[in-house]
Image: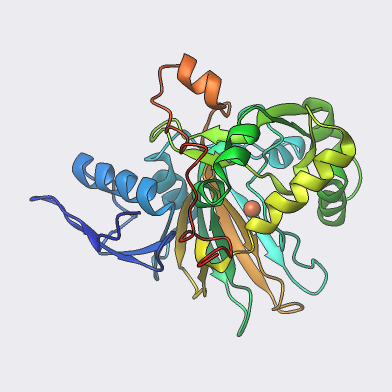
Amino acid sequence: MSGSASVQSSSAALDIRPLGGRIGAEVEGLDLREPLDPERLRLLREALLEHLVLFLRDRPLSDDEHIAAAAQLGRPNVYPVTKARGLDQPLEFILDSEKSPPKTDLWHTDVAFLPEPPEIAMIQMLETPDAGGDTLWCNLHAAHDALSPALQAFAAGLSQDLHPGAYFQRTIEQQFGPGVYEKVAEEFSGTQHPLVRVHPETGRRALFLCGTYARRLVELSPEESDLLYGHLRSRLDDPNIQCRWRWRRHDVAIWDERSTNHRALSDHYPARRRIRRCTVGANRPLGVRAAADAGIAVAPLPSLEARDGTVAGGRLGA
Ligand SMILES: [Fe+2]
């Protein structure tokens, strides 16, 4: 992240205020209810690539306005669970309440078990609890770059076995009863994605962790896979590569699903919290070799001799 406070152009500057050093920025002066002119849309995309998650305070949107705003960033997706319920709207409504406890208080990127998971998500907060219910995001580029060069090189050769999984099944059955999960699992019986994902627009490497959708690292034994996942997942808990948003009603968040994990805290339970979400774009994640084959200029690895000592990961001054 360059640390610049704004993305400027002569005709359409965006007022961008970073939340921290490595991820997240608040954007002011942007009306999502109207189509963005090409220059402002370009600046918004640029800001998203730089900050990975953008926040807009108090921007009430109707359902249709939400879809239209998100569609400027890519083609809207129908969530597989929505589809399995016989609906085709590209919106999901996520409700936490006494009878529907929070379900995503764990690091993940959305529906990573799909062969082509979504690229970008846009959510709007519809109902906020009086306290709690914040969301955290983590920068997966920074999580990758904080690994030693030797582990970065090793990780680049690994792939992940992904499946909707038992946790997802429980949450779907809690919300919609029996039958829905089975339809999703029947259509999406599993896929493989690289552990190190190359961002198609920037060439940057990301540690593409996928929460409970990841069953194992394919090239390793189950014990080795558990051990390495344990270490890699622990990296996400480094506050230096996170940001945290305290919601107010009608706030909007837009994030890059390819280079972040997020986690919705559950400390507001049993209070209500309700969100509307639209995801857009869908692409098969590319590992280092596939990205290079596709003509993407992949960020080089640091030399194996290089040692940091200043990056996130608890190694400051080590
Ligand atoms: Fe999510």
Q: Tell me where residue 275 sits by quadrant.
A: bottom right
Residue at 79% over, 28% down: 218
Q: Nearer the viewer, residue 171 or 155?
A: 155
The percent coordinates of residue 45 (x first, y second) are: 33, 44
User: Residue extending furthest right?
Assistant: 178
Q: Tell me where residue 287 sits by quadrant.
A: top right
The percent coordinates of residue 205 (x first, y second) are: 50, 38
Quadrant of the snapshot with the N terminus: bottom left
Q: Is residue 251 above or below residue 174?
A: below
The percent coordinates of residue 27 (x first, y second) are: 32, 62
Numbered-mark total: 0
The percent coordinates of residue 80 (x first, y second) are: 70, 37
Residue at 52% over, 69% down: 244
The colour scheme of the drawn protein is rainbow
Residue at 30% over, 60% down: 3
163 sits left or right of 50 in the view: right
Quadrant of the snapshot with the C terminus: bottom right
Is residue 170 at all visible to an observer of this figure? yes
User: Residue extending furthest top?
Assistant: 293
Q: Is residue 260 above or below residue 298?
A: below
225 sits left or right of 232 in the view: right
Residue at 55% over, 57% down: 138
User: Residue extending furthest bottom?
Assistant: 130
User: Residue extending furthest front?
Assistant: 305
72 sits left or right of 305 in the view: left
Is residue 180 at all visible to an observer of this figure? no
